[in-house]
Amino acid sequence: MTSNTTLENLANNPNCMEDYDPNAMHVTKAREFIRQFLNPVSAIETLALHDSLGRVLAADITSPANVPNYDNSAMDGYALKASDLALARLKVIGTAFAGRAFDGKVGDGECVRIMTGAAMPIGTDTVVMQERVVTDDAFINISEPPKPQANVRYAGEDLKLGQTVLAQGHLMRPADLGLIASLGIAEVSAYRKLKVAFFSTGDELVGLGKPLNTGQVYDSNRYTLFGMLTRLGVEVIDLGAIADDPVALEATLLNAAKQADVVITSGGVSVGEADYMKLLLAKHGQVMFWKVSMKPGRPLAYGKVGNAHYFGLPGNPVAVMVTFYQFVRDALLRLMGQSTPVPLPMFQVQCTQPIRKLTGRTEFQRGILFTDTDGIWRVKPTGAQGSSLLSSMSLANCFIVLDDSVGNLDAGAIVQVQVLDGIV
């Protein structure tokens, strides 16, 4: 993509982009196009450490001290001089506890009983495990001498003074809270929460608690979107299910774009479909409609409405989830300020059942990863793979990712799987 290509001239003149084909967009190419136009939020907040989980750091966290800040024992045992390891017998002259150091200096032929985490006494540089000694009143005999300087954690061994501990753009995880707390830091600088508004479209959608007439369905997409967005830690704005009424759709779209950084809709983006949403997006936005060479989730729209990024997802429930995880998730993490979003884990395993697939498109079939009787991880499809079968997503803990070059596969074939547990 050339540096002077804008979303507006791409939307108005697709031919300005080399190899840009909205009628045959590859999954990888669609991701690359979207990334070109993502500018992270810039507003910054100061948060208490407890409140920073799931937020993106707006500044580096640097260590204000060495960690650990003193030499200490890595285990329970006896602290001594390495030069005394050859002695058959050492005198125990005291005890060092974690938080209560031994007040004295250790001389030749002497040692100190020491607990894990206790500061190394002056004059010592080695710890022998308590299981490797035989006690004899105020003396010990070493049955298995360790190597010199063994079992000691040195000052700055984990982190050094001034070292960058977590970089700007890092998404805070549970372990990070403990890491920052260990430095004595109570507050962090983070980007503000990303605001995401979403709504469903269609006359056929009915709210929960109401009876269904023939041709109607309950609006499940808003609930899966709510769950996926909440998992990402964004500020969620649910604008409901909107009937195919141009006035209501226009008001909802403009309201969403006004109050959110990102607007997501489900339904009404099928290429060639005559619906109000496409007309409204052409009127108020710079939006591109793609036929992505994938299944499920072929129709996809991306662009801007006002200052908000816009994602138009298909209407089928499974297609909504697949397109969210393959396109929207990465984009939202980047907009949140994460420098390099971690992709969904993917690796190769054996598939225990045959798979039917056409070449020429990437498929994300729902699968179940399991350990067989031999303890080896394998995968099997959940069953029928229709894009309206939301039960397949509840059963699945992974996607079986089959790229466009893959066709029908026999049982026993090696396939790529994309892990969903902990993500979905």
Image: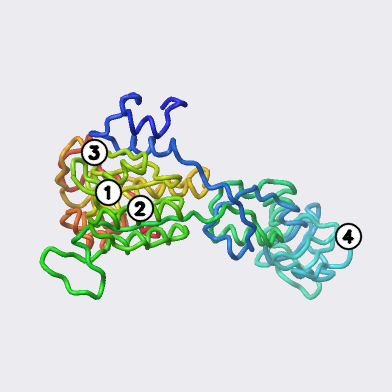
162 relative to 14 in the view: left or right: right
Q: Mark 3 or mark 1: which is in front?
A: 1
Which residue is identified by label 3? 293
- Mark linked to residue 253: 2
Numbered disc total: 4
Dot 1 lies on which element? helix
From what the image shows, is residue 100 above or below residue 399? below
Q: Name which of mark 3 and mark 4 comes first in the sequence.
A: 4
Q: Name which of mark 4 and mark 1 comes first in the sequence.
A: 4
Q: Mark 2 or mark 4: which is in front?
A: 2
Residue 300 in the image: state x and y as whole percent: 28, 44
Which residue is identified by label 4? 107
Residue 177 in the image: state x and y as whole percent: 60, 61
Q: Name which of mark 2 and mark 1 comes first in the sequence.
A: 2
User: Which residue sits at x=44%, y=57%?
Assistant: 232
Type of amino acid under label 4: Gly
Q: Mark 3 or mark 4: which is in front?
A: 3
Q: Name which of mark 2 and mark 4 comes first in the sequence.
A: 4
Q: Mark 4 or mark 1: which is in front?
A: 1
23 relative to 347 in the view: left or right: left
Which residue extends farthest left?
214
Quarter of the rendering containing residue 84: bottom right
Dot 4 lies on which element? loop
Binning the other alpha carbons within 10 Å of mark 4 as few (below 14), some (14 to 19) or many (20 upward) gives some
User: Do tag 2 and tag 1 residues touch (Cβ < 8 Å)?
Assistant: yes
From what the image shows, is residue 361 above or below residue 98? above
Gap in Å between the C-alphas at discs 3 and 4?
76 Å
Type of amino acid under label 2: Leu
